[in-house]
Amino acid sequence: MSLINPIFFLQKAREKGVAIAAFNVHNLETIQAVAEGAAEERAPVIIQTTPGTLKHAGIPYIAACVKEAAKIYDIPIALHVDHCPSYKTIVQCIQHGYTSVMIDGSQLPYGENVELVRKVVETAHYCGVAVEGELGRIGGVEDDVFVDERDAAFTVPSEAKEFVEAAGIDFLAIAIGTAHGMYKGEPKLDFQRLSSIKEVVDVPLVLHGASGVPEASIREAIRRGICKINIATELKIPMADAIKECFKNNPDENDPRNYMGNAKQAVKKAVREKIRMCMSNGFADELKRL
Ligand code: 13P
C-alpha cells in the first residue's frame, strides 16, 4: 500500500468506539518496530515524527523508510509530523510524502494561531494531506518544547468549536489533564470536559501524552470520543532499557545489530500492547470491508 491520509480510518475508528495509536519514531529500528507490531496486530497505525527527529534523521530518510514499510505490510499507515511550529518544515514534509501534519501554534495568541493554522490547512488540503491542530496547552516536555505545569491550560469547549470552524482542521488535540513524558503521580483526566468538547466539536479528537496513563482512563477517553492516541515516552523507555540491559550483560558488545536488535523487539512488544489498549487490533481487516 501507499501511505494514506488518516482521516478515513480516524472517522471509522470513532464510529466503532476504538482509537488509532500514533507512535513517535526516531530511527530505522523504531519505524520497523511500529510497522511490524501494527502488522502483527492487523491495526491501522500513524507513524509520527517531531521536528527534533526530522533534524536528527532527515525528512527524506524518514519518509523513504516509512513509505517502504507501507509497501511491505498490508495495513493502512499514515505518516504524520507532530507538534510542528514551522510552516516551512510542514511544506517540506508534504513534499516528501507525509500524509498528515500537526501545526502547533498553541504558543501564539489565539488570532495568530488561527491564521497560521488556516495557512497550513489551505496548503495541506490542496495536496490531500490532513491537518491536526491543538487548542489549550499540553504540559510536559516534547523535544525542545517545555510547558510548565502552571502554563498548561485545559481546552475550553466553546473555544474548541470556534477554533475548529475558523481554522478548518481535520482533527483536534485537546488538553484535558495529560502531559508529555511520564507522570509523578496518577494523571487525573477531566472526562466531563472531554464529553463537553465532543458535544460541540465535529472532528476526531486526539489525546497527547498517553504514556503512563492507566488503561482504564485511556478506555474511558476512547468511550467519550478520543480516536487518536499519541504515545512516545513508553516506546523510548523499553528501547533504552533493552540497550542498557544488553551492555550490562556484555559490556564489550559493539555490534549495533545486537543491541539495536534487542531494542527493536522491546519497542515492538510495547507497540502491540498499546494497540490492544486502543482496541484497534484487527481493525485493518474490518476497514477493508467498509
Ligand atoms: P508521551 O511521551 O507522554 O507518550 O506523549 C506523546 C505525545 O503526545 C506526542 O505528541
Image: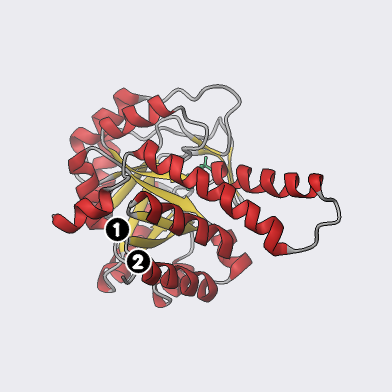
Give percent across and percent down for residue 76: 31, 61
Quarter of the picture holding the N terminus: bottom left
Q: Quadrant of residue 290?
A: bottom left
Secondary structure of the residue carrying tag 1 is: loop
Is residue 76 positioned above or below 226 on the image?
below
Residue pushed farthest right?
Answer: 252
Mark 2 Cα-neighbour bin, 10 Å: few <14, some 14–19, many ≥20 = many
Residue drawn where x is 35% and y is 58% of the image: 117
Q: Nearer the viewer, residue 7 or 102?
A: 7
Residue 253 visible (yes or no): yes
Q: Earlier in the sequence, mark 1 or mark 2?
A: 1
Residue 54 shown left or right of residue 126 in the figure: right
Residue 82 shown left or right of residue 172 in the figure: right
Q: Quadrant of residue 192?
A: top left
Task: Count up the numbered dots.
Answer: 2
Residue type, numbered disc 1? Pro
Give percent across and percent down for residue 247: 79, 49
Mark 1 Cα-neighbour bin, 10 Å: few <14, some 14–19, many ≥20 = many
Q: Are marks 1 and 2 in contact (CB under 8 Å)?
A: yes
Residue type, numbered disc 2? Thr
Describe the colour scheme in one phrase.
Answer: secondary structure
* Residue carrying label 2: 99
Is residue 229 positioned above or below 124 on the image?
above
Residue pushed farthest left?
Answer: 290
User: Which numbered circle lies on residue 6?
Assistant: 1
